[in-house]
Amino acid sequence: MAQVTILGAKGGPAVRKDGAMPTALLVQMGGVQIVVDCGLGVTRGLVQAGFDLRGLSQIVITHLHSDHVLELGPLIHTAWTTGLKTPLHIWGPPGLRAYWDGFMASMAFDCNLRVADEGRPPLGDLVQLHFLEEGAFDIGPVAAQALRVLHPPVLDCFALRLDAGGKSLCLSADTAHFPPLADLAHSADVLLHEAMLPQGVEAIIAKTGMGDQLRAHLANSHSTAAQAAQIATQAGVGHLVFYHIIPADDPAFGLPDWQAAIAGHWNGPFTLAHDGLTIEF
């Protein structure tokens, strides 16, 4: 059995009362637990899902927007103070090095003190960074493939396919409509695809106080629900799941709106993600 738990279902960095948290996933397959993206709230989400932070060993960051990387350092530091003593592998874009060095510099006082005062292994010695490129790589026994997707102005944003034990999962990361993604997702058991309701965009613009630039970014860098459904159909996947949902915390939009948006584009199993949801495949 394999499964993916949605730790954060929303797209974008803002958090609101009783709303979903930014993007984070826990994938369990092939006997390995992989955290994919570390938006705000990932640590609490993992603990709530029953994950032992001392066992944190594999993290993948799809790109460096804050709603995917903001809590990476705090997650690792919290795991370390919880008792993590074993190597931790982090996969991500080349800019990950600057993020990690900056985080370690910001926490130097605390980290050095805990090593000297509490006898912990140096945190920097546990962490190994691996930089994503397009193509195949292995995460332990899990065969992984990375595909650079279309998310301007970010150049290094990667969709992922994970295969192990006859099970397959593909996740889009953040992307505008990108037909090559259908090839990556071909016959996958589950496709997690970001999705946006066009009719919800103006509500987001109003809430954030932003204007034409945010509107243009959303239009140029993200997929509508209909476009995501088309990718799922072209790929012939078994189950379509929308995550990185835009909007995710507006009570004016619910499941019927998403179902209506994909009607005529996808007729297979469909799930709209929410925080804490676990999907087995």
Image (cartoon, grey):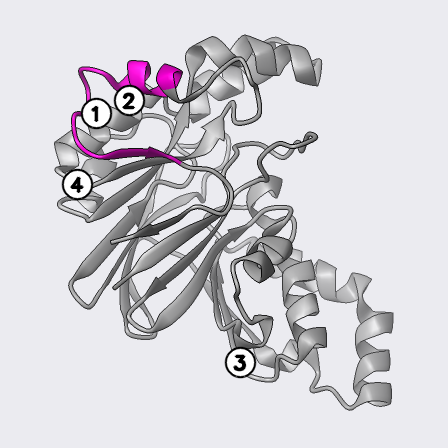
Evaluate whether residue 43 shows in this view.
yes
Taking the magenta stretch, the answer to whether it contains residue 270 is yes
* Mark with earlier residue (4, 3): 3
Image quadrant in which you'd find residue 231: top left
Instruction: Quickly name the residue at label 2.
Output: 227
Do the CB atoms of the residues marked 2 and 1 lie less than 8 Å apart? yes
Most distant residue in the bottom direction: 119
Q: Nearer the viewer, residue 46 or 109?
A: 46
Badge 1 amino acid: Gln
Q: Secondary structure at mark 3?
A: loop
Instruction: Quickly name the residue at label 4.
Output: 237
Is residue 113 placed above or below 172 in the rendered structure? below
* Mark with earlier residue (2, 3): 3
Inter-mark Cα distance, 2 to 3: 39 Å
For the record, the magenta segment spans 256-272
Inter-mark Cα distance, 4 to 1: 11 Å
Tell which tag, 4 or 2, sits nearer the viewer.
Answer: 4
Q: Secondary structure at mark 4?
A: loop
Tell which tag, 4 or 3, sits nearer the viewer.
Answer: 4
Inter-mark Cα distance, 4 to 3: 34 Å
Residue density around tag 4, few if under 14, some if 14–19, many if 20 or more, within 10 Å: many
Do the CB atoms of the residues marked 4 and 1 lie less than 8 Å apart? no
